[in-house]
Amino acid sequence: MLGHNKETEGTRGRPGRRGRSEREPRAGEEPQPPAPPSSSGSRRRPFKGAERAQGARAAELRVRVRLPDGQVTEESLQADSDGDSISLELRKPDGTLLSFIADFKKDVKIFRALILGELEKGQSQFQALCFLSRLHRNEIIPSEAMAKLRQKNPRAVRQAEEVRGPELLRMDLAVNFTLGALLSPHLRNVCAEAAEAIYARQEDAHFWLEQGVDGAVFEPLPRDPEPGLARCRQVGEHGKPCVCRYTLSLAWYPCLLKYCHSHERPAPYKCGIRSCQKSYSFDFYVPQRQLCLWDEDP
């Protein structure tokens, strides 16, 4: 056990801080749709980690990318070579805002989703989720190389050259938001809206503990509290606990550096990047089916 869970089962495991409730429409008024969350979900600016807050320079690249379903959206990529991190952000057609941070200094990947709620199903304005996993050096290009990327045609629609295999991660730990900066300085800002729904895995936590991270950062989640706990998509009653699954996709990101050869240069030299697409699915415990309404049978 990596830490003592001081929260009750009813609070830990809730997927995200809820948005403010909407005003009830007056007689004769049309109900207003929920406003989509901003890039930060509040007045915070996304990806403003500790290094950037101290004035480190960051380079930004905006590209138009084709999503797996064929639709096109704009993606923002930022590289902080001083802080040694890369961030990515895109908004899906349904309004969901996806954010990704690669923290090379701490070997941490942070995934955040701000999911618009469906008021007709009794949901609040939005839910927020954060998932943390170990960053391996061969997953994405270095921040210094990312900071130098430029594009000749900003209106071109980019499609990944390589589709990497999907990854399923079973999240069996919660992360203490108050102590999260000990794991990555980016967590406090990026996951602020998901303070009660930050998840990690035992196997990744063991690696971070070996790097000197305090074990109090991690709190155990209920492990199969009921025999044969079902996936939420198989549970009909909204008040029952279940295993929730959330899937997201990084539609386009620079995953490898390309090297070229020339008669004029004796050694290979960097001459471009290879782009990749990758999907991630996260399984995690929720105390109520109501907290995982997106996980439905196709």
Image (cartoon, helix red, strand yellow):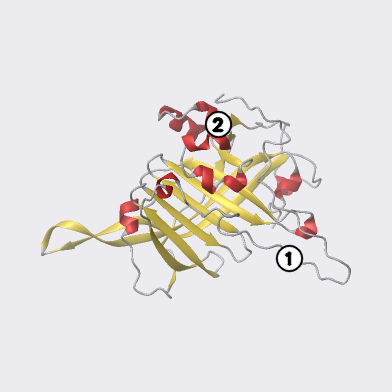
Query: Which image quarter holds the C terminus?
Result: bottom right
Q: Amino acid at mark 2?
A: Phe
Quarter of the image for residue 71 reads bottom right
Q: Is residue 48 left or right of residue 128?
A: left
Quarter of the image for residue 227 reads top right
| Distance between mark 2 and mark 1 Cα atoms | 37 Å
Mark linked to residue 218: 2
Q: Is residue 273 left or right of residue 132?
A: left
Q: Is residue 89 left or right of residue 172?
A: left
Q: Residue at x 33, y 61 (%)?
A: 273
Mark linked to residue 89: none
Mark earlier in primary sequence (2, 1): 1
Task: Please name whichever residue, 228 or 123, is drawn nearer the observer in this view of the structure.
Answer: 123
> Can you name the residue that lies furthest to the front here?
54
Q: To which residue does mark 1 refer?
A: 33
Q: Residue at x 35, y 54 (%)?
A: 57
Label 1, secondary structure: give it.
Answer: loop
Task: Please name whichever residue, 125 or 130, is drawn nearer the observer in this view of the structure.
Answer: 125
Query: Which image quarter holds the N terminus?
Result: top right
Q: Amino acid at mark 1?
A: Pro
Residue 223 location in percent, x, y?
A: 65, 31
* For discs 2 and 1, the disc positioned in front in the rendered view: 1
Q: Residue at x 78, y 56 (%)?
A: 121
Q: Is residue 115 left or right of residue 80?
A: right
